[in-house]
Image (cartoon, rainbow, N blue to C red):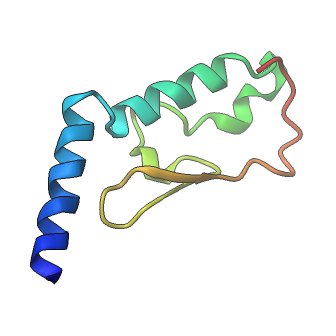
Amino acid sequence: KNEKHETLAFSFLMLLESYGFTDETDKQALFEFKSQVSEDKKAVLSSWNNSFPLCTWTGVTCGRKHKRVTRLNLGGLQLGGVI
């Protein structure tokens, strides 16, 4: 039973990736978010670039297994902008 569940979960993940739901889409969404942050606060998100792995970006938490964004915690950073 557990093997069947794992196969189904793997198939589902492969289906998602075939439709473009990958860590790359997570990254693009966060880049779009950053583009809306006011200029004077963008330095706070300086780790949000292609030089750093997505899961090490400020305020970003990823799942262990698939390295996809599971949480965004930007409280206290006093960001401003129109989202």
Query: Farthest residue toward the front?
Result: 1
* Residue 81 x %, y %: 84, 20
Is 29 on the left or on the right of 53, as rendered? right
Q: Residue at point 78% right, 17% down?
A: 39
Q: Quadrant of the C terminus?
A: top right
Is 77 on the left or on the right of 73, as rendered? right
Is 81 above or below relative to 47?
A: above
* Residue 21 x %, y %: 33, 34
61 or 41, nearer to the observer: 61
Q: Residue at point 76% right, 22% down?
A: 37
18 or 33, nearer to the observer: 18
How many numbered callouts? 0
Is 41 on the left or on the right of 19, as rendered? right
* Residue 29 x %, y %: 52, 27
Q: Quadrant of the N terminus?
A: bottom left
Is 28 above or below relative to 69?
A: above
Query: Farthest residue toward the bottom?
Result: 1
Q: Residue at point 71% right, 31% down?
A: 43
* Residue 41 x %, y %: 80, 28
Q: Residue at point 19% right, 71% down?
A: 5
